[in-house]
Amino acid sequence: MALGKVSVFAVKFCSATKSGAKYVTRGTKNLVKNHTPIGKRLRDGVHHAREAVKIKMDLPADPSAGMFERVKFLISEKGEQALINLQKDKQFVKLFEKYKAQRMSLKGPGQNFRRAKIKYEVRETVKSALKSGNPDLSKLNNERFIQEVIETLGVGPTKAAQIIADTPALVKQIEEKFGPKVVEALANTQKKCFPTRTIKQAQEVIDKAFPGQNIKIKQDFGTASIGETYLVTKPDGTEHVIKMIKNGVSKETLNMEENLLSRMAREFFDDPKVLSKYREQLRTVYSDWAKELNFVQEMKNNKLLAQGAKRFRVANITGISDDASCIIMDKANGIQMEKLMEMLKLHKANPAKFATKYAKEIETNPWLANPEKVAKELPSTLLKVFDEQFMFMKKGAQTVMHGDPHKGNFFITADKNGKLIPEFIDTGSCVTRTSAQIKDDINFFSNYFVGNSKGVAEYFVKQCPHRPFRTEYVVEKVAKDIKAEIFGKKHNVRKFNDVQAKINEILERHNLQLPPESTTAMKAQMQFFSNVSDAAKLTGQSIDIITLMKDIPQASLGMAKSGINPWSSVRDAFKFAFHNQKQAMGTAYQFTIKDVDKVLKSDGTLATVA
């Protein structure tokens, strides 16, 4: 009986304690919110932010706007004369013939007839382009043929197609001007390029690379812009993946491609500064692509990226041939991110069709049986991986980030508890960052999230070559433009790629240009954020900035251990946010809005506010 009274008393006591705690919490919140200077400032900031978002949100300027008109103008004005000049240039013709012999005369599976036809159609297309300034693509009547044209032209055009396919604004313009078949061909270059070897030819390469090991090809496993892979089995029955460089791709052909494009550019760009900038960009991208040919470095990057990884995995490279022409690796687990996104989109549109179409994949990957859970967890999973690769120190006081983390370069799997885990492949290009660079990167993102134009300008100007004594002057000029054209308006700043393109445009306006190493690092960071944003759109989630903020202490500890003051990485953003509530809260508020792209009308106004 006494025990019953004690139990009743305990329940009442706990209930009273909870009520009291709630009362104290409400009182504390009220005190801070309404009766302290900082509370009032934050309250006013949120109020102004919500009102600003309700009234108007400007769309970022499309960096590709007018691109087709500019290209058409250049072709129509200079194309015919350019062709005449290039045909007279014996050195160019000799180089082109050599390139064509190595690159365009491949004897891949079933390609003899198609490649002959491609040469003819490309020639006719170029002629029509030079005459009218607008290519006649009427003969390129199916996406497979268009894709072959792109890939036959070289690594650069194939890479460009993959980049364009990942740029919605460009895709929309291309579809309007050239139709859906061209868009489909561009998208297909991301999913799988055409192989340059038959299975028999690939088996001969493997037998030569790994003599006496009796490794047999089971099936073609996928081809990218530079490498092609094959699923193989060893005598013990285990499955592995072997990667080799595509036929017709080498350092020599990449150099020839770059030199041909560089020479052609001279015919179209009269301004020496514009020509120099274009050639520098060519050098940067071809230098990055050449790294993918180096399997020795890819193996080193593979081990470095995997070292101490907590939130992701890396498909382990287990061997390399003596001549470094092939690498053998573990088969990546799970579903490629590109395919997983397609699967989840189908489930959202038609759950029954999803279950039927992907029954085999669900059986192999039981975690796929709950696609709603997968879609909900995917954004935070990817953001946590970004945080680890972007901010967490490894041995040697540096971080290591995958240099090309597009959706084709990682798979999604799950551990025994059903927790999603990305698994990366293609580690030929990785980005290493020192603790000082990490501090600068965190400083940039924290300033970006609160709309601190000067903080963002300092980050970019600091990396660009310029006269040191003009730094403050240049920062003020760049910051003024960033404020006027990005944060000063109510832009949708969650579109990271568009905003970065706009900032690059502003830098060029002030004769500034990011060096190649900074461009590569920024590209990798933006690819991660694009992946997170795309995943978030599946369920209308906002980007989980809280996850990013929770990981900063661990990053700060790593910086402190290497002698870098971690507080300095976020100090400027906090100071700006305290003194500029309306701007800071107006920018930060966007990252809390669910489905902002869905509710944003064409005129920039919001239909609803989440």
Image (spheres, grey):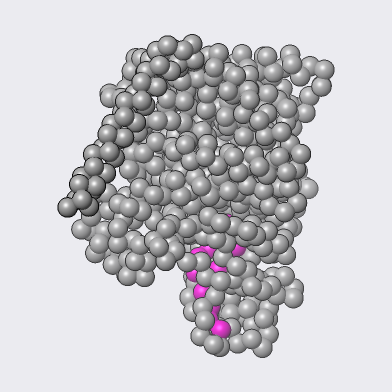
Residue 540 seen in this snapshot: yes
Q: Is residue 49 above or below residue 264?
A: above
On-image quarter of the C terminus: top left
Residue 56 seen in this snapshot: no
Q: Can residue 223 be found in the magenta stretch? A: yes
Question: Of all residues shown, which one is farthest toward the left?
Answer: 1
Nearer to the camera, 179 or 595: 595
Return the x and y of residue 588 as percentages of the image width and height: 47, 25
> Hey, which quadrant is residue 76 in on the image?
top right
Nearer to the camera, 292 or 586: 586
Q: Can residue 355 be found in the magenta stretch? A: no
Q: Residue at x 58, y 32 (%)?
A: 445
Q: Residue at x 34, y 23 (%)?
A: 26
Q: Is residue 348 above or below residue 439?
A: below
Return the x and y of residue 178 as percentages of the image width and height: 41, 40
Question: Of all residues shown, which one is farthest toward the front?
Answer: 2
Return the x and y of residue 382 as percentages of the image width and height: 48, 48
> Hey, which quadrant is residue 543 in on the image?
top left
Q: Residue at x 69, y 40 (%)?
A: 559
> Hey, which quadrant is residue 48 in on the image?
top left
Nearer to the camera, 560 or 102: 560
- Majority secondary structure of magenta residues: strand
Nearer to the camera, 101 or 426: 426
Give the magenta part as a residue range. 221-234
Q: Is residue 509 above or below residue 144?
A: above
